[in-house]
Amino acid sequence: MLIKKPSDIRPSEITSPENYINRRDFMRVGAIAGGSLLAPAALAAVVPDSHLAKLPDVGSSPFSTDETPNSYDDITTYNNFYEFGTGKDDPVVYARDFEPRPWTISVEGHAEKTGTFDFDDFIKPFDLEERIYRMRCVEAWSMVIPWVGISLADVVKYLQPTSKAKYVAFETLNDPERMPGVRRRVLDWPYREALTIAEATNPLPILAVGLYGEAMPNQNGAPIRLVVPWKYGFKGIKSIVKIRFTERQPLCSWNMSQPREYGFYANVNPDVDHPRWSQARERRIGAGIFADKQATLMFNGYGEQVADLYKGLDLRRNF
Amino acid sequence: MVTLQQVRLIWKPVAFVLCLLPFALVVGDLFEVTGRLGANPVEEILDRCGNWSLRFILITLAVTPLRRLTGWNWLVRFRRMFGLFTFFYALMHFLTWLILDQGILLSAIVEDLAKRPFITIGFVALLLLTALAATSTNGIRRRMGRRWQTLHNAAYIVGILGVWHYWWQVKLDTTEPLIYAVILALLLGARLFRHRLRRYQLPFLTKR
């Protein structure tokens, strides 16, 4: 079903010397705009102009939507990434100097291939694909984002989970030195998320390493993050350092923090309201201030691919 | 010494312009003259107007304790203006929600007002503010006599409802609503303390 282009340049080459040079420029622009941490609006106008390294050999995907993607500006200045502050305009400012290299990912638990992998080695065996997905935040707004990533199903199969593996758990880097938001215990760090094995081997989820054909901006979860388009955005754990195959359902950060409001599944569902707000409609970012909200779709419009996963499950109770 | 003349001709117009500045910035940012409203402009307008309404209710409630503390009696000349700006920003916050956020979709509005307690609370606060704003002229104040003060004590309730409304809608990080709550508690505490002193007949401490 996947359309894949044969590639002779490995994705590992995305960390080219230019990347580091670009990164320096990126930081310099930040420094010029700096001294004005109190003026994120001014910064926002500067930062998106400094783009990151182009990713080589990116194939296309039949799963991409033909809806118009949000601007690079919108995608990179309006972020929920509490490790860099709880305001939506915090990550673009406080993740500016974050260095997502060197980066290692440790694979643990019930799988044949466990151990610690360098980021480049980790993604090397897989093909990069562009996946233009709708992203529905639990806060009732949405975007369309042209991610670049590798299929999570491919990764899971490659790591050869054993028959005991029922869930895949992920963890974000927990480094108070490099992530100022972690110094405050708004969540029980590190950020944790998980999927069932069936969800993780569905063809839709990806481990994204970039967007708009370029390396992942820090504020969007550099260097590697999860994207599960039929679930609320908070399932899309960022800056992943650990993948663990478990037998029992792992703890997830938002569920731990407020179990009444955020469930393990977190499937987009217009019929199950958040206790404090309706999930029936959503505001599409970038639609303009006079645009109406639009109806939220069951499984964020990906029901055809994923509804089978939840047959017989009471989605009102398992929200 | 600040004379009444100076207050009326210089400081009140200056204060008026300053109070209007946050709104002017919203309009300026909307047209990208003074800055930008960001990726979600509706939410940004909603947040800014709501925040300023909260700040103004606290400023309004701070006038009397500050006057007693400093003896600057001219401060009271600004209280009505601050109160009316509380109402103005609350109204802008409400209209942004009604028109831009909900798109005047009646079914959604009724559902929100009835089913979302934090919205109900905010709406009640706005109704109270409307009553206070409508009875804020000197003429009405004179005609209402003692009942005016009773009615206008509702400003405290507005403060409590406003902070509660903010606290309840925050997703996780309650730092900012906590700051508002602490200031509000101090302002209400100061009044309670004074009330107590008077009951225990220590008038020398409360002569102003």
Image: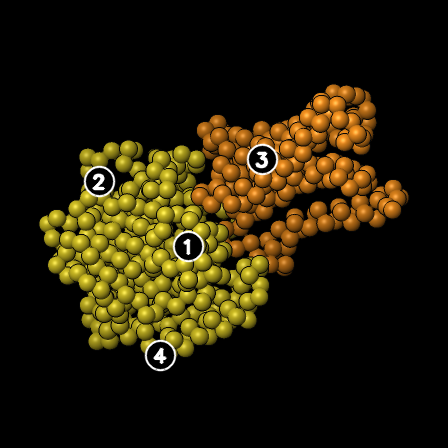
Indicate the amino acid at tag 1: Val
Asked if both marks, 1 and 2, belong to the same chain, the answer given is: yes
Give the vertical position of A262 relative to A79 (above or below): above
| Residues under numbered marks 4 and 3 in contact, where contact means CB atoms less than 8 Å apart | no
Local packing at callout 3 (Cα closer than 10 Å; few below 14, some 14-19, many 20+) is many
Give the CA distance from mark 3 to mark 1.
Answer: 30 Å
- Residue A196 picture location, percent across and down: 21, 47
- Residue A108 picture location, percent across and down: 20, 57
Disc 4 secondary structure class: helix
Residue B162: image tag: 3
The C terminus of chain A lies in quadrant: top left
Q: Which one is nearer the viewer's eye here, B136 or B192?
A: B192
Residue identifier under label 4:
A17
Indicate the amino acid at tag 2: Tyr
- Which chain is rendered yellow in the image? A
Indicate the amino acid at tag 4: Pro
Residue identifier under label 2:
A310
Chain of the residue that carries numbered disc 1 in the rendered image: A
Q: Residue at x 51, y 38 (%)?
A: B167
User: Which mark is in front, 1 or 4?
Assistant: 1
Left or right of residue A90: residue A242: left
- Which chain is rendered orange in the image? B
User: Which mark is in front, 3 or 1?
Assistant: 1
